[in-house]
Image (cartoon, rainbow, N blue to C red):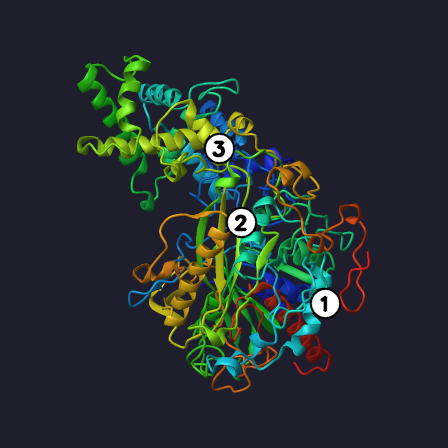
Amino acid sequence: MEIIKSKKEYDVIVVGSGAGGGMATKILSDAGVNVALVESGPYFDPANPDQQTQLKWPWESPRRGAGTNRAFGDFHMSYGDWSLDGEPYSSVDGTDFKWWRSRMLGGRTNHWGRISLRFGPRDFKSKDFDGLGENWPISYEDIKPYYDKLDKLVGVYGTKENMFNEPDGFFLPPPKPRLHELFYIKGARKSNVKVMPSRLSVLTKRINNERGICFYCGQCDRSCSVYGDFSSSSCLVIPSLKGGKVDLYVNSMVNEVITDNNGRATGVSFINKENGKDYKIKGKIVVLAASACATARILLNSKSKAHPNGLGNSSNLIGKYLHDTTGAGRGVFIPELMNRKIYNEDGVGGMHVYSPWWLDSRKLDFPRGYHIEVSGGMTLPQYGIGWNPNDFNKFFGLRTGGYGDSLRDDVKKYYGSTVYLSGRGEAIPLKENYCEIDPDTNDKYGVPVLKFRYKWSDYEYKQAKHMHDTFEEIAYNMGGIPLGNKPTKKDNYGISVPGEIIHEVGTTRMGNDPKSSVVNKYERLHDVDNVYVVDAAPFVSQADKNPTWTIMALSMRTSEYIIDELKKQNV
Amino acid sequence: MKRRDSIKTMFLGSIGASLTLESCITSEDKTVLDQVWQYNYGRTTEELKWDYKVLTGKFFSDTELSTIEKIANIIIPPNEYGSIKDAGVVELFEIIAKDFSTPAHNQYGEKVLRRGLIVFESICNSRFNKSILECSDEQIKSIFDDIAFSDNKDEDLQEAIRLFAVYRGMVLTGYFTSEIGIKDLGYKGNTPNVWDGVPEEILKDYSVSYDEEWISRCVDQSKRNNLAEWDEDGNLLT
C-alpha cells in the first residue's frame, strides 16, 4: 500500500475542528505555533451561498425540508447524523447507543443549540456532595479565568443571577421573552421552579468587527451566515487560517497516532476520502479533538509494542465512563394561545428563558439535577406542519379529521398554541458504560469500528420521572393541557436513548492517578507526554450543563499549557 | 467560478464521467440540471446525487397523478391564495414516493402512497362502478364522509381511514410549506429584523406584561451596534 509522507514537521497536529479543536487551533496559531488541522469532513463556511441554508423557505427543498438526508431536516446544518453510510457501529447486550457524527469544518458547533452554561463549583466536586462518581482534579477556580476569556472572545448572552452553582460571566444582554415564554414564566413561578433568561452564544450586541450581530431569524441550527452565533468554523478556524500558521487538511480521516520505538507520538496517519490514499504527517505534539468516541477509537486503534492495547491505555479505561445527558420532554397545548394574531416572533435560534436546576438533591430520590428548556411559538413551517390539523379538537369534544376548507381554519386556529418542555439532566458516569473496538467490523476505509454498551441506572430513571411530574405541574400552571400520556415505569419514564441528546463525554477521563484516569489535569495522556485530548473525552462528569462551553475553556487552558511547554522546549 | 458553474461541476462530477463535457449534456440531462438548479438549498455532493435520483424517473403514472390532484383539491379546495397546483402538492407526492425509499421507510411510496390510491379506487369502484377521475366531487365527498373521520369504527374501512389520514397530512403539509400556503397561514418571519419583544397590543390582548426587573436587563436594541465592554465584575458598560 502506498503511503504518502510529508517531510514537514508541525509543532502541533490538531485532529478535529469542532469546539475543542477549533479553539486549540486558534490559541496555538495566534501564539505563532505551526499547526496542522486535520478534519474528516469538507470545508464549510456558513457564509458560502452554495452551502448556506439560513433564510431558505421550505419550498426551496423538493421534499419541503423532510429529514431523509439530514435527521433534523434538510436545512439543519450537520453533514452526518446518527448514521453515516459505510461507517457503522453497534451496541451489545440489548443496549442501545446512538452516535451523532458531524463531518464538516466546525463539526457539531454548526448545528448546536448555543446553550452556553459554565459548570459550577459543585459540578467539579460532585463526589464530595453525594459520594457518587469521581471528582475532577481541577476546581471551578482553575477554569474560571478561561470561562471569562471565552465569554469575551466568543460572546454569550445572559444575566447575573448570583446562584451558587450557576456561575455568572461576562454577558451580553438577553432578548426579551416571547409570548409563550411569558406563559412559561408564569407557570414555572407558580410551581416554585426558578426561571431566568437563558444563556446562549448568540450576539445580541457587537463584540468585534469581524462578526455580525444577530438578526433574529431563529435559525441558529442552520449556522449563521453573518457569524452572529458561535460556530467553530466561522468564529475560530476560518479566522485562524488568515494568520498563515495553519495548514488545513479536509476530508481527511485520522485512523491512528503514530509513535516511535519509545512510544512517543511522532505524527498521525489519515485517509484522504477523495482519493482513498493513506497519508502520514509529522508533529511534535498531537492534540486529539475528534469527539469523545472518535478520539477513543483513534487511541484504541493506535496499537504498538509500547502501547499494546491502544495509545495511552495502560489504565484500560479508554472508552469507559461514557455518558450522555439525560433527556425527557412533554408537549403542552395552551388553549389561550389559539387563534393567535400573527407577528414575527422568530427571535434567536433557541429559547429566551429557561430554568436552571432549582432543588436540593439531598431531599430527592435521585442524586443529580436537570434544567428545563422551553420551545414553541409561531415558527417557520416545515415538512410535518398540518399533519394532524385538528387533533386538539378532542379537548373540546369535537370530531377530529375531516376534509375541506375547515381544515385550513383548523391549522390556523392551533398554530403557535403548543409549548414544548425539555428536561436535560446529569447522569452518573459508570465504568460499565463504554465504547470499545469491534474487532469483527471495519468501516469502508478498512478501520475497525466501535461497539457500545450503555444502560441508564435507576438514578437516571428516577430523574426522568421527576422531570415528567414537573412538566405536568408547570403545564397546568401555564393554563395548558399536557399532550399524550405521561410515560410510566413501563416506558422508562420517557427517558432518551443514550446518545440522543448528543452530549456524549467521558471516554478518556481526567485525573491525578494514572491507574484511575487516562489524562492528567492538563488533558495530556498519563502514558505519553506529547498527546493531548481537548474534546469532551476528558470530562469526569458533565453536570446538567451543555458541554461546549467547558470543552472550549479547557481547550484554551490546555493550549496555553502546550505553548508554555513548547517555549520551555520540553517537547 | 460562478456559483451556477460550480454547482454544475459538482453535479456533473457526481453523475459520472460520461457527462463531464458540456457537449455531452443531452436535452434530458439539461432538464434535470435545471430542475436541480430550481432547488438551490446548500446541498453536499452526496445530497445532490440523491436529489438527482429523486428528481428523475417516474413513480406515479399520469392517471395516478391526476387522481391525486383531484383528491387533494377536495381535501383543500382552492381559495384566494391559490390552489393545490400552485402549492406544488402533487409534485410533492411524486417526490416523497421516491425520496422515502431507504430501508427504514419500508417502501413508503408503494405500501402507503400508492396503496392509498388502490384502496380509495376500490371503494369508489364498488360504490359507483367508476374510477375516482370519472366520479363527481359529490360522489367522492360521500366516500370521504366515511373515511375522513377517526371516530368511524367500521372495521372494513380502517385501512382506508388510516391511509386517508396520510393523504390529508401530505396535502396539508404540502400546502402549508408552499409559498401560497405560508402566505395563507400568515407566518411573518424568516427575514432579518431587530426583535424587540412581544408587541404592546398583543401583551394587552392576553393581559400579560413584562416584569420590570426582568426587562431592564434585556437588550437595548438602540445600543446593539456599540462594542461590548464590561467592568471587571462582568457589568456591561456599553
Q: Do the residues labelled 1 and 2 touch (CB within 8 Å)?
A: no
Horizontal arrangement in the rendering, residue A85 relative to residue A207 (left or right): left
Up the image or down, B42 lies above or below A441; here it is above
| Residue corresponding to mark 2 | A375
Q: Mark 3 lies on which chain?
A: A
Q: Distance between the residues labelled 1 and 2?
A: 30 Å
* Residue A9 visible to an observer of this rendering: no
Left-right relation of A256 to A140: left
The C terminus of chain A, quarter of image: bottom right
Residue that mark 1 sits on: A149
Nearer to the camera, A236 or A350: A350
For disc 3, the marked residue is A413
Q: Where is residue B105 in the image (x, y as percent from the top left)?
A: 33, 43
Q: Which badge, 1 or 2, comes first in the chain's sequence?
A: 1
- Residues at marks 1 and 3, CA–CA distance in whole angstroms: 47 Å
Q: Which of marks 1 and 3 is nearer the N terminus?
A: 1
Under circle 3, the secondary element is: helix
| Closer mark to the observer between disc 3 and disc 2 | 3
Q: Which amino acid does label 2 sit on?
A: Ser
Q: What residue type is labelled 1?
A: Lys
**Residue B64: x %, y % from top left:** 31, 22
The residue positioned 55% from the left and 54% from the top of the image is A104
Corner quadrant of residue A392: top left
Secondary structure beneath label 2: strand
Quick one: A121 or A542, which is closer to the camera?
A121
A466 or A313: nearer the eye? A466
Quadrant of the snapshot with the N terminus of chain A: bottom left
Q: In this view, does B190 lie above or below A272?
A: above
Q: Does residue B184 sit above or below B189 in this rendering?
A: above
